[in-house]
Image (cartoon, rainbow, N blue to C red):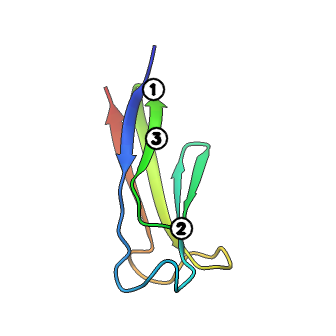
């Protein structure tokens, strides 16, 4: 059976990803996506069930950026 497609969209406020050399890492299970631009990410064929999506704003050295909104996780349900 085919799964569902999910769009992950985000915005970085108070900085410029390119000029500040920031990246957003999107984690979904064992998959990891590294984004250097603020563009929507399409994840295809997610099977039914609950999935945890985590986004982290990281500096050039790979460490999570300091701040209360630098890391967020959401649970989604595919039916």
Element marked by disc 3: strand
**Residue assigned mark 2:** 36
Task: Answer few, some or many: residues within 10 Å of disc 3's Cα (few below 14, many 20 plus, some between 14 and 19).
Answer: some
Mark-to-mark CA distance, 2 and 3: 17 Å
For residue 53, above or below residue 14 = above
For residue 45, above or below residue 68 = above
Which of the two marks, 2 or 3, is nearer to us in this view?
2
| Image mark for residue 43 | 3
**Residue assigned mark 1:** 47
Extreme-top residue of the structure: 1
Element marked by disc 2: loop
Mark-to-mark CA distance, 2 and 1: 27 Å
Viewer-nearest residue: 65 or 18: 18
Q: Where is residue 20 in the image (x, y as percent from the top left)?
A: 53, 85
Which of the two marks, 2 or 1, is nearer to us in this view?
2
Element marked by disc 1: loop
At x 40%, y 25%, the residue is 48
Q: Where is residue 69 in the image (x, y as percent from the top left)?
A: 38, 75
| Image mark for residue 39 | none
N-term-proximal mark, 2 vs 3: 2
Viewer-nearest residue: 16 or 8: 16
At x 46%, y 13%, the residue is 1
Mark-to-mark CA distance, 1 and 3: 11 Å
Task: Answer few, some or many: residues within 10 Å of disc 2's Cα (few below 14, many 20 plus, some between 14 and 19).
Answer: few
For residue 70, above or below residue 15 = above
Left or right, 69 with reference to 54: left
N-term-proximal mark, 2 vs 1: 2
At x 48%, y 77%, the residue is 17
């Amino acid at each position: 059976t085919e799964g569902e497609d999910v769009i992950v969209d985000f915005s970085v406020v108070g900085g410029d990803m390119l000029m500040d050399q920031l990246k957003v890492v999107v984690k979904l299970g064992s998959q990891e996506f590294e984004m250097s631009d603020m563009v929507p990410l399409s994840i295809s064929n997610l099977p039914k069930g609950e999935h945890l999506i985590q986004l982290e704003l990281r500096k050039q050295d790979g460490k999570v950026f300091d701040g209360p909104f630098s890391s967020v996780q959401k649970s989604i349900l595919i039916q």
